[in-house]
Amino acid sequence: MSGSRACAVCGNELGLRSGTGRGGRPARYCSDACRQRAFRRRSVRHDDDPAGPLPPAAGLPRALDSFVGRHDELTRLRALLKSSRLVTLTGPGGVGKTRLALHTVAHLRGAASGRRARLVELDTLHDGDRLPQAVAAALGVGERRGRTGVDVLVHALGSGSVLLILDNCEHLAEPCAELAAQLLARCPRLRILATSREALRVPGEVVFRVAELSLAPVHGPDDPATVPHCDAVRLFAERAATAAPGFTLNTSNAHTVAEICRRLDGLPLAIELAARRAGTLPLGDILTGLDDQLSLLTDGSRTGPGRHRELAAAIDWSHRLLDPREQAFLRRLAVLVGGFDATGAAAVCTAGGADGEPRPQQVLRVLCALEAKSLLVRLPGDAAGAARFRQLSSVRAYALDRLTESGELHDTWQRAVDWLTRLLAPTADQVFVDQAGGAPTEERENLAAAVAHAGRDGDISYLRPALALARVRYQQEQLTASRALLTRILQDDTEGVLGGAALALATRAACRQADRAAALRFAEQAVAVERRGHSPAALANALDARAAAHLCRGDFAGAVADFAECLGLVVPLGRPRDTAWCRHHLAWALLHTGKAAEGDALMSLCLPLLRTWPDGGASSAALHTAGAIRLALGDLDTAEELFAEALRTVPGQSLHALYPLEGLALVAGEQGDARRSLLLLTAAAQARRRLDTEPEAAWLRQVEAAALRAQAALPPPARDAAVAEGGRLRWPQLIGHALHRDDRPETADPAAGRGDMSPLTGRESAVAALVAEGLTNREIASRLGLAASTVSTHLDHVRDKLGMRSRAQIALWVAERARVTAGRRPPRVS
């Protein structure tokens, strides 16, 4: 045995060749490098005794299946392990904290490499006092020379560069925190990587939240060529292929796989358990079975931790660590499927402050505690707004089971319905509540869940939340869903709880679907109901709805009458926004009865306020109305400015952006730029086909007439080129083209693109023609239905464009244009 001595630093065998060290003593190190390492250790050691090295590592456990995704997390975590001495991976059970930690450490290089890592698994340890002994056992060191507890670990770790992995700390969070603090203070080159469902809260700790796997976009195409880039889908496909050899993603199953992963919130454990069912169940049955996912997602790996063999066990592990108040919150929050803030949680989780019940002032603290323990997820949002949370679907399913077992299900649902009803109270006396957003939109999923639950037993308390949900569906342009809900509401509201509000909304939804007969029927009923009531605001809402029904039937005179009565009711209420909105509606109807000047006067009163409307669609509609009126009055420059402002107001592609886009095309046509007009109209028509929407009939006729004029004004090559270019423009390029006229493409000869068009607009040409007939400004105004001042403005534009001062010159120019049109010689004006 004399030749089997080991190096005191690295443990390599010295053998007989190592000879003796300094002073004739037997050599203790295999090389000068190890001797220098030993010297450095002695210089920073806090113990008088020489510290022996840790026993050789047994090696980290090797995974038997592939590691999928998380490229960004791996990169960030490697960087953190180089710069931070304590990193804690947090996240819900089954999110993959342990797997990520082991995979990261196994691929480290340098001083913090996996060769110097030691794994301490704590899931089977339940006594915090035995934590130091458990860690020592995992490190393979024992008590010597009277050292016990933490001293054993400090002596073993010494000044060596070691990465200690403390796995599954949440049930021993406080003992783990104390141990980590002591070891890091006394072992200068130690690093700790912990996994826990909550942070350890040690000074210097860096908390790294392990998120769920990436998912395919909800509204994106589930194309098998693109969904594999989503980590959740890749994981399902790889695990399903082991359960059902030959399984691959294809056009027939990509959508179903993506939806399974969405339903499971991208939780790796849940996805793996679902993928195991691919060997016995069709994908469609797996998706359907997720309605009871805790029963379906079982039969995990027999060699893995018991808490990972089924999804319910993973959540139950966390549930047992909660105190009674936190458990009560967790189960009651399950009814808020759409997420919640502290106010909503307090309304649903607090039962009147009874003994043992959580009190409202404790709510935020409990929510933060549940989030810290990875049982709630904080939703991204405005940092200045109230914090909003949600439960993962698997956690919610578990919590709902606990809520049913507790006997609290009915009372909790009732509190949720009552809270949502109170939330809607501020909108009860609004005039135009159907166009309002706010809280109902944010709580739409909670509204849907409450309506589904409360309406089962004939309980009419669901009616107001149901009407709010129908409004949300209407605002989201889900008209069929809105009308279906309204049909149910109208059948159940036998006592007239909602008055004419549901009928007014049904009117608007029917108008949007061009169901004109139903719209007018609902509108007449709404007005009749509200005339018997005592609410001016409710009657104004019903009249506004009936006016909309008249508009969609082309009865502009009837619309003007209803809008005027509505305005008369709203003005005394002293609500500036409602008054402005009503004036805007009346101005639009007046425009179509030939009273553009009256409409313009109304818009000058209401537009400044409507410009500040928080809803981009509403403010854009007002700007479009103002632009259409200025267009009718011949003020092309102002009309163009208003249409452009409206287009900038609307974020993204929507029907609200199409009206001002078409308005800019009409202005271009009136300005004589037929090519630009046709290009924009072609692109707008293509966008309408994509969005499956048509404009109002009167506006459509105006747009179609402008398109015909532009086509007639252009030679066939220029016309075809404009149509082709308009069809190629995608939305961002189209908006840029519409708003930046200087950037628009031109033909080599601008005049060639416009053919023989007049520099005058249509209205200016009409004024010039009547001047040529010898009419005065007042007579022209009477003939065209304009104000005399408007005619004077048009005449000034004609003089400026033609460079003429006298009416006689204008008459001569008109005569020359007529001869050119008839094929005679080109005009000459001296």
Image: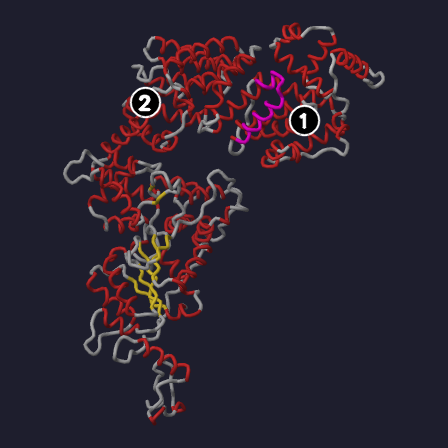
- Magenta-span inclusion, residue 552: no
Residue 286 shows up from this direction? yes
Question: What kind of residue is marked 1?
Answer: Leu
Q: Is residue 240 above or below residue 525?
A: below
Q: Earlier in the sequence, mark 1 or mark 2?
A: 2
User: Predominant secondary structure in magenta?
Assistant: helix
Tag 2 secondary structure: helix
Label 1 to label 2: alpha-carbon separation? 49 Å
Start-end of magenta stretch: 629-648
Looking at this view, name the residue that lies furthest to the left: 355
Tell me the residue at 44%/25% (across/down).
474
Relative to the observer, which residue lies in front, 123 or 679?
679
Tell me if mark 1 has few (under 14), some (14-19) or many (20+) residues whose alpha carbon lies within 10 angstroms of its own.
many
- The percent coordinates of residue 774 (x first, y second) are 73, 6
Q: Which residue is mark 1?
A: 678
Q: Nearer the viewer, residue 445 or 4?
A: 445
Q: Is residue 821 left or right of residue 155?
A: right
The residue that mark 2 highlights is: 463
Q: Amino acid at mark 2?
A: Leu
Quadrant of residue 57 within the rendered picture: bottom left
Q: State the image quarter where residue 305 is shown.
A: bottom left
Q: Position of residue 144 (x, y in %)?
A: 22, 77
